């Protein structure tokens, strides 16, 4: 039965009945969901219908089932080029060329990708927003007719709600799908595309395949299948504010998000607008303490403290022993003199020593 459907699908494709071909391939896939050829052929039919995001999803599924299928990489690269995802397309073409080096189409497409990437880099390097918009429109006139949000919407009816929020460096997409096994979830990332498929046995597959508002870094993207949801983290290629999750034609160039860099030293609360050099202030306080002029007992105590601070170990031991044993009346710095004997106290004139009983 699946073979008959595949044959009819191929005939419909040859006769340019691409919508019928997609329908027949889909029926065949329902009967034989592990056939990589069916997904690769449906991808080609979707490309003819300008359903580029669906084509990428089909090509990814074909590659997942058979990573040695060169034409699956060709389909993926072709669809990505139509979506202006030139880096992702180039990667797919390079993988296909490694599998089928005799196919000259891969080399031609890789060269075309390099030219588009170079042109795109030159466009985005221009400071003028107006010039950038005009240059982008001029660089891909054939795609404009197919880059509206309508084409990027999934064919199947959404049965799971999704939403997103963003940070300066990433966009977090949440699909509220409860109790979904991780093995039934497939998430793929492109240069400017996200493909989420939830394929539960006996149910119609759920697809979320938007062309994203901005470009991402696929290697840094990740996802987690949790008990109540699927959380997807998209690493932004540029720290710009996304006004929506999906790409919108003729959208105003978004403003870059200012990411504050941490200061070298924490600044303390102050009503003054100028900064305070705390290291310099600390050094100044220490200098003032050192140069402070003291009188009487305070000056004498500071004198002894300075001696003790700068003394060696024997001198400190001598000072401690003599001061304690003499009840604070003798302070010696000669350990050889006081180390081998008890230091007797010498009371000031007119005073006498008393021994306290505890």
Image (cartoon, rainbow, N blue to C red):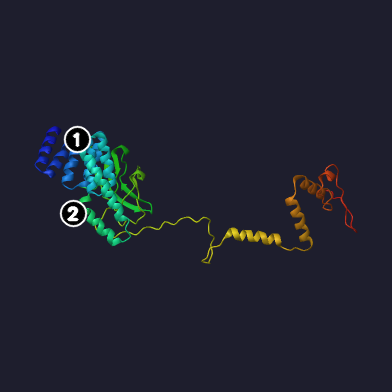
Residue at image coords 13%, 41% = 21
Q: Residue at x 26, y 41 (%)?
A: 92
Residue 205 shows in this picture: no
Give the residue number, with chain letter if any, for mark 2. Answer: 145
Mark 1 — residue? 37
Decide which of 116, 159 is in the foreground and name it: 116
Is residue 253 found left or right of 339 in the rendered image?
left
Lower sequence index among marks 2 and 1: 1
Residue 289 lies in quadrant: bottom right
Q: Residues within 10 Å of mark 2 (few under 14, many from 20)?
A: few
Quarter-wise, where is residue 177 in the image?
Answer: top left
Considering every residue shown, the one lying at the far bottom of the view is 272
The quarter of the image holding the N terminus is: top left
Other residues around mark 1 within 10 Å, as few (<14) / some (14–19) / many (≥20): many
Q: Horizontal and vertical percent for residue 274?
A: 52, 65
- Image quadrant assignment for residue 340: top right
Residue 211 locus on image (x, y percent)? 26, 50
Nearer-the-camera pick, 223 or 253: 253
Residue 100, position in %: x, y? 23, 34
Which numbered circle lies on residue 19? none
């Amino acid at each position: 039965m699946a073979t008959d459907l595949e044959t009819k699908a191929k005939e419909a494709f040859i006769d340019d009945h691409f919508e019928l071909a997609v329908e027949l391939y889909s029926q065949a896939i329902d009967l034989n969901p592990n056939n990589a050829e069916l997904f690769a052929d449906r991808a080609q039919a979707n490309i003819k219908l300008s359903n580029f995001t669906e084509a990428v999803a089909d090509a990814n599924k074909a590659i997942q089932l058979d990573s040695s299928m060169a034409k699956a990489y060709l389909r993926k690269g072709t669809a990505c080029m139509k979506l202006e995802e030139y880096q992702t397309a180039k990667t797919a073409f390079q993988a296909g060329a490694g599998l089928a080096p005799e196919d000259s189409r891969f080399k031609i497409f890789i060269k075309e990708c390099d030219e588009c990437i170079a042109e795109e880099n030159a466009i985005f390097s221009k400071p003028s927003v107006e010039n950038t918009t005009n240059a982008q429109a001029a660089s891909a006139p054939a795609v404009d007719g197919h880059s509206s949000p309508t084409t990027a919407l999934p064919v199947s009816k959404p049965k799971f709600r999704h939403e997103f929020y963003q940070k300066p460096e990433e966009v977090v997409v949440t699909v509220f799908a409860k109790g979904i096994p991780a093995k039934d979830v497939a998430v793929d990332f492109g240069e400017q595309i996200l493909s989420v498929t939830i394929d539960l046995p006996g149910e119609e597959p759920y697809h979320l395949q938007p062309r994203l508002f901005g470009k991402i870094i696929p290697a840094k993207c990740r996802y987690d299948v949790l008990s109540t949801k699927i959380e997807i983290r998209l690493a932004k290629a540029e720290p710009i504010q996304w006004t929506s999750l999906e790409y919108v034609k003729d959208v105003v160039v978004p403003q870059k998000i200012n990411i504050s860099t941490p200061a070298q030293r924490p600044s303390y609360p102050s009503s003054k607008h100028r900064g305070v050099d705390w290291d310099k202030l600390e050094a100044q306080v220490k200098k003032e303490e050192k140069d402070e002029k003291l009188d009487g007992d305070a000056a004498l105590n500071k004198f002894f403290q300075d001696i003790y601070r700068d003394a060696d170990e024997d001198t400190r031991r001598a000072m401690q022993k003599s001061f304690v044993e003499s009840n604070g009346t003798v302070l010696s710095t000669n350990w050889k003199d006081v180390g081998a004997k008890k230091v007797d106290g010498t009371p000031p004139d007119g005073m006498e020593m008393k021994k306290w009983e505890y």
